[in-house]
Image (cartoon, helix red, strand yellow):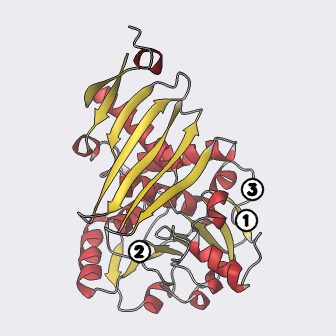
Amino acid sequence: MTDALFLSSEAVAGLATPAEYVDAVREGYRQRGAGAPAEPRTALYNEEPPGLFTSYAAVLPDTGAMGGYTYSAGFGEGDAWFVTPLFDAESGEPLALLDGASMNPFKTGAAGAVGVDALARPDASAVAVFGAGAQARGQLRAIDTVRDVETVWVYSPTKSSREAFAGEMDRYLDASVAAVSSSAAAVEGADVVVTATDSPEPVFDGDLLEPGTHVTAMGQYHPEKRELDDRTVARSTYVIDLRGRLTRDAGAYMHAVESGAVEADHCHAELGEVVAGEAPGRTDEEEITVFDSGGTGIETTAAAAMLYEKAREEGLGQELPFAPASEALTGRE
């Protein structure tokens, strides 16, 4: 018998800063680049009631942890529930079970920020954000830890949403944040473009990207949905979180290959390979780069392990007993 720590969403909220999430996730991707195991999500779609049940996992040996996400979204309640199991990578014993809801935008934002740090120009200061929800907030707060953000333009189809987002983030960041009325206005002059939407179609015209722009696309993880058009994919040095997604759920990339806009081997590298120095990142100031961040167990496990250690230090959480199979399956005490 062993005890694991249960951490509620309330316990996790505010436990770590955006910068701490970024540091943990960067280290997770470095381990992936050095060969740590990770697999893309397995997605099960339900027609009635419409919903998604999915999971993904990773092993981070240097962190000493392995885990991932199992979550449901949609179904009868039209909501989402995130469960994060964390295991010891040496003994295999369960360490913790986290309610992953409140950490979700931060760990996902951290993955985007690691991509920005690895691929965007060092002097990037102008950010365009598509979307005005929690994920957009997470992306922007994390990017602000790796670049000196001076200007932010946000576009969302709903005027009230983009204006509310701009007002909130303008107060939070030491930057000028403004809502704009079109996707073209958001992209113009942007050094970094972030798409954090649930749009099934491209959210901006790839021809409008200026040389040297970096794009983080984090809302596309369905084979028939894409936030980026073929032109953006074709113009870019394309980096993905896990290569296994290229033929599974990287909708923009899959569409570009199917249309003939790019060859099947257009993807430059995994982010972990760039972070670990196994593949080059940006090579010149004119290069357009893309990080396709569909969600993996890498950032989830890295963030959960970091939160687990901080929770232990602060005496947070509730212990839950787990029985090993050697006892439970045999009835041996």
Check residue 279 in the rendering and tell me which mark sits there, or answer none: 3
The reply, left or right, for residue 46 in relation to residue 258 is left
What residue is rendered at 71% in x and 67% in y? 267
- Decide which of 11, 256 is in the foreground and name it: 256
- Between 15 and 167, the residue placed more toward the observer is 15
Quadrant in which the C terminus is drawn: top left
Lower sequence index among marks 1 and 3: 1
Can you tell which mark lies on residue 268?
1
Q: Position of residue 105 (x, y in %)?
A: 37, 58
Provide the residue designation for mark 2: 197
Q: Is residue 96 visible?
A: yes
- Decide: marks 1, 3 in contact (CB < 8 A)? yes
At 34% across and 61% down in the image, what residue appears?
Answer: 73
Which comes before the other along the chain, label 1 or label 2? 2
Tell me if I can see residue 235 in this picture.
no
Q: What numbered label is drawn on residue 237?
A: none
Identify which residue is drawn at 57% across, 67% down: 249
SS class, disc 3 = loop
Q: Quadrant of the N terminus?
A: top left
**Residue 162 percent across, percent down from the top left:** 29, 81
Q: Amino acid at mark 2?
A: Thr
Q: Mark 3 or mark 2: which comes first in sequence? A: 2
Given residues 80 and 151, the one toward you in this image is: 80
